[in-house]
Amino acid sequence: MVLKRRTLVGRLLLVLASALVGVVAAEIGLRVWTGLTLRSGPGLEDGLERSAVTSPDPDADTTSLRGLVRASSSPDLVYELKPDLDCRFKGTRVRTNSHGMRGCELTVAKAADVFRIAGLGDSVMFGWGVAEEDTYLRVLGQRLGLAASGGRQVEVLNFAVPGYNTAMEVAAFRDKVRDFSPDLIVIHFVHNDLGLPQFMIEGPNPWSLRRLWLVDLIRNGWRGGQRRGWQWHQSRELEGLSGEDRRRVQDAYAHLAGPEAFRTALASLAQIAGADSIPVVFVLLQTDGEPYAEASATADHFGFLEVVAGPFFTNYIRDHNIEPTRNGWAGTFWLSRKDQHPNELGHRLFADAIFETVMPLVY
């Protein structure tokens, strides 16, 4: 009897020892995998240094986002589009002018008969995956031009950069856009505009003993673990970070991310635009749910003209007998089921929504 008990205890200890070895091996494996991933990831120093020496091949089928951007001299912008590009990105042609904005060449000085609309945004406004002529700012400019009278011209300047958040967009207005004497500002809000931009911070230290990667993986699930752990440079809010990583980011970039930074940025935009008597149009897809509801309330507080594009999308779904489901939206308005950036139709509907608000301001 005693021997059987000893045998049972021995087996249990062996199982526990094997499990412990397995856990340790899994933890080490995750840390090694994370370290290898981070070395090729878009940390600030690593990503921008690589971008500086990465020149898009005009003959290649596509290039990476890294090839489109460079470090900015403005610390609040962090990075910007390279000037004078002509390449293919996400399956379509992308060209930038000498000022580093998507579109044709133009002068800083504005002609007397020109009405200028400057767009501040991220990859959506930039036109991720769609042709330049199909971006909603370009479509809006063409529609306004057709409605022009008395020889007045409309110029639309697309200052959007993929990965920018609201604080960076306002910094772009302060440091760049204002010099072009815009008559109207269009700023686009998306759900991650309170978060950290790309190419902004170094990844977490995979060898720090202050966190257990396996615990994070189990807690968040595989996909959630990837999003919050190894790719947290794209996380939506600073509150999603913890421990050593969170403190490092807060010290360096807290003024550019989070709800308070968002409100401060819009306050700055309202102050500068108000001093120059420039109306601001605040574009968003919806006003229900967070962070859209807070963004809408903040924009209203500062007197911005709000454009909610969602009803134009839902009306299209209804009028064309499309199922009002995620699959219905994905197949109709997105680039693909895995890429939620708007396609050509989505951009046209954004232009439709903005046109009704902007038209009386232009003429």
Image: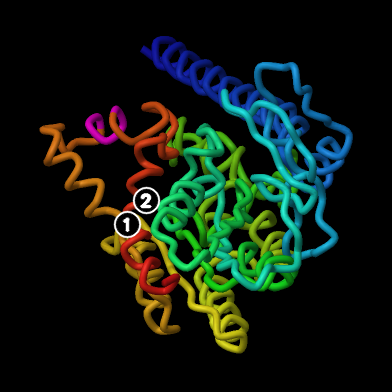
Residues shaded magenta: 327-331
Foreground residue, 8 or 276?
A: 276
Q: Which mark is residue 134?
A: none
Q: Can residue 309 be seen in this view?
A: yes
Horizontal arrangement in the rendering, residue 193 relative to residue 34 (left or right): left
Quarter of the image that includes the C terminus: bottom left
Residue 353: assigned label: 1
Marker count (numbered) = 2
Between residues 197 and 329, which one lies in front from this camera angle?
A: 329
Whether residue 329 appears in magenta in the rendering, the answer is yes
Residue 170: image x %, image y %? 62, 69
Secondary structure beneath dot 2 equals helix
Category of crowding for the residue at label 2, using alpha-carbon neighbours closer than 10 angstroms: few (below 14), some (14–19), many (at least 20): many
Q: Mark 2 points at which residue?
A: 350
Q: Residue 133's spot in the image, x, y percent?
A: 52, 39
Q: What residue type is labelled 1?
A: Ala
Left/right of residue 100 with respect to residue 113 in the rendered view: right
Choose between 67 and 360: the one closer to the eye: 360
360 left or right, relative to 192:
left
Magenta stretch: helix, strand or loop mostly: helix
Indicate whether residue 117 is drawn in magenta: no
**Is 333 situated above or below 233?**
above
Instruction: Please indicate, yes or no, whether residue 206 appears anywhere in the rendered image.
Output: no
Q: Residue 318 location, x and y as percent?
A: 12, 41
* Residue at point 45%, 47% (across, down): 139
Residue at (72, 54) in percent of width and height: 106
